[in-house]
Amino acid sequence: MAKNHLVCDKTEIIVTVLMGNQWRNVSITADKIRRIQFDRCKERAFLFKTVDSEKISIEYSPSPAPIVIFKQKEKKYFDDYKKQLEKFAKDNHLTFVDNTR
């Protein structure tokens, strides 16, 4: 069963990510976020099949690697994530790039 893995507050994002074999909540305040970006990508849908898809990248400090959310894995909530993050970026004057349009 799919669950919502992203919540945006006024000045904070809470993302549930898979670290190793456990799900963990990562809390990121707006002042730590360097960029939020939406991109097109290829994603493996079935064992040997790849499909056109989209991904969300959230770059923040001090982490060298961004948090990446893929559409196929979060299909039910993905469009809602995009709306929330776009509004969050505008409200907090963050760098926001949408390469999916």
Image: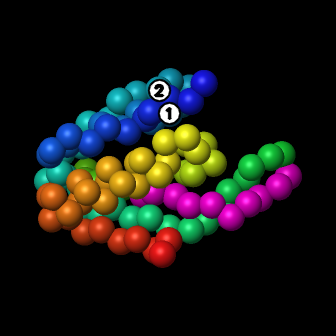
Q: Spatial distance from mark 1 to mark 2, Cα to Cα?
A: 4 Å
- Whether residue 65 is visible here, answered yes or no, is no
Number of other residues with Cα within 10 Å of mark 1, as a class: few under 14, some 14 to 19, many 20 or more: few
Is mark 1 in CB contact (under 8 Å) with mark 2? yes
What amino acid is at disc 1?
Answer: Leu
* Rendered image coloring scheme: rainbow
Question: Callout 2: helix, strand or loop?
Answer: strand
Q: Badge 2 is on which residue?
A: 23
Q: Residues within 10 Å of mark 2 (few under 14, many from 20)?
A: few
**Which is nearer the eye, 92 or 19?**
92
User: In terms of sequence position, does the residue under pointer 1 or pointer 2 come before the other?
Assistant: 1
Mark 2: amino acid = Trp
Q: Camera-side residue: 21 or 78?
A: 78
Q: Position of residue 51 (x, y in %)?
A: 73, 60
Residue 20 at what x, y percent from top left?
53, 31
Majority secondary structure of the magenta segment?
strand
Magenta residue span: 48-57
Residue displayed at 44% across by 33% down:
4
Query: Circle 1 — which element?
Result: strand
Question: Percent from the top left, x then y, of residue 12?
Answer: 20, 42
Let me know if residue 28 appears in the view: yes
User: Is residue 5 left or right of 43 when viewed as pictured?
Assistant: left
State yes or no: residue 98 in magenta: no
Residue at the spot of label 1: 18
Against 21, is 10 above or below?
A: below
Q: How many marks?
A: 2
Q: Residue at x 68, y 57 (%)?
A: 43
